[in-house]
Amino acid sequence: MNSCLRTLILVPLLAVASGCVTVSKQQYANLSAGAIGCPAEELQISGEKDSFGIGEQVTPWTAECRGHRFICSAAGQIVSCKEELKAAEAPAAAPADAQATDAVK
């Protein structure tokens, strides 16, 4: 009887532990709002995953508000969003690459 009782308790617990957590666009908007400084109802979310396995790392998503686009990520309970760089703002080639190009000339 004792082993039957253990089985009845362990099976549901294992099912929950191996399950996925579902995350909605609204939850992403709520998480992003404070990091961006834009109301959640004005945010448009894209690139998000709708579910995560237990222990799986959250991948970055994009949030847009008032013509600005942000790349957001999360680590545990901490959310960080930075405005996406425009093509002209992308970092220049590393100095070693530039020297290698000059040496070829």
Image: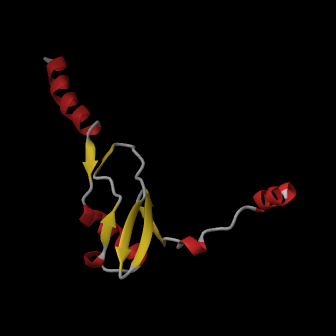
Tell me the residue at 25%/66% (across/down). Answer: 26
Image height of 8 relative to 99, above or below: above
Tell me the residue at 39%/65% (across/down): 62
Please give left or right for residue 24 compared with residue 87 in the image.
Answer: left
Between 88 and 30, the residue placed more toward the observer is 88
The residue shown at (43%, 58%) is 60
In the rendering, at what x and y percent does residue 100 appear? 81, 55
User: What is the x, y in percent for residue 44?
Assistant: 30, 71
Q: In this view, does 20 lie above or below 3?
A: below
Left or right of 75? Residue 3 is: left
Q: In which quarter of the image is residue 67?
A: bottom left
**In the image, residue 80 lies at what x, y percent?**
46, 67
Report the quarter where the C terminus lies.
bottom right
Colouring of the image = secondary structure
- Looking at the image, residue 4 sits to the left or right of residue 40; the answer is left
Number of callouts: 0
